[in-house]
Amino acid sequence: MIDHDSLVDRARRAARNSYSPYSGFRVGAALLTGDGSVFCGANVENAAYPVSNCAEATAVNTAAAAGTRRIRTVAVACIDADSIANAYPCGGCRQVMNEFGVETVLVATGDGPYRVHGLSELLPYGFSGGFLPGGGGGSGGS
């Protein structure tokens, strides 16, 4: 099984593949699925900002397209952040992680120590499919 240090390292390496010509803010993500598989992603910007993709969403969507429905841990590395406080996932990505039952989120910059959080700490009262009529949908949520 891959450990947290290795997952953060993979996220940092993924950030080097970022396509971020507008912000210059490179972000990578690496996630560990319930079966031990690892998927990576990087942010992909677009001149029409709303259609850009965050690294975390890219990694989750790649895993989902491969059939993954349960993700245990996501490492996020913002290698251009000037402090770890500026390296956290956006609210949309927190909700995407919630959909797939992420338990642990690792937050890192380009080097140095990283922080470990439970997703419920970063997204209290997350919305899940259980709230929808019929109770269908994702595995996450409160």
Image: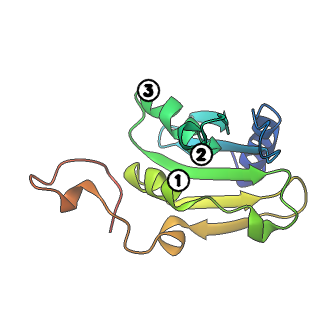
Residue 56's disc is 2
In what quadrant of the picture does the C terminus appear?
A: bottom left
In what quadrant of the picture does the N terminus appear?
A: top right
- Give the crowd class for mark 2: few <14, some 14-19, many >=20 residues within 10 Å: many
Helix, strand or loop at mark 2: helix
Decide which of 103, 76 is in the foreground and name it.
76
Q: Quadrant of residue 10?
A: top right
Helix, strand or loop at mark 1: helix
Residue occupying image coordinates x 64% and y 42%: 55
Q: Is residue 106 above or below residue 43?
A: below
Q: Amino acid at mark 2?
A: Glu
Q: Earlier in the sequence, mark 3 or mark 1?
A: 3
- Mark 3 lies on residue: 65
Q: Amino acid at mark 3?
A: Ala
- Give the crowd class for mark 3: few <14, some 14-19, many >=20 residues within 10 Å: few
Q: Is residue 142 above or below residue 103?
A: below
Decide which of 28, 47 is in the foreground and name it.
47
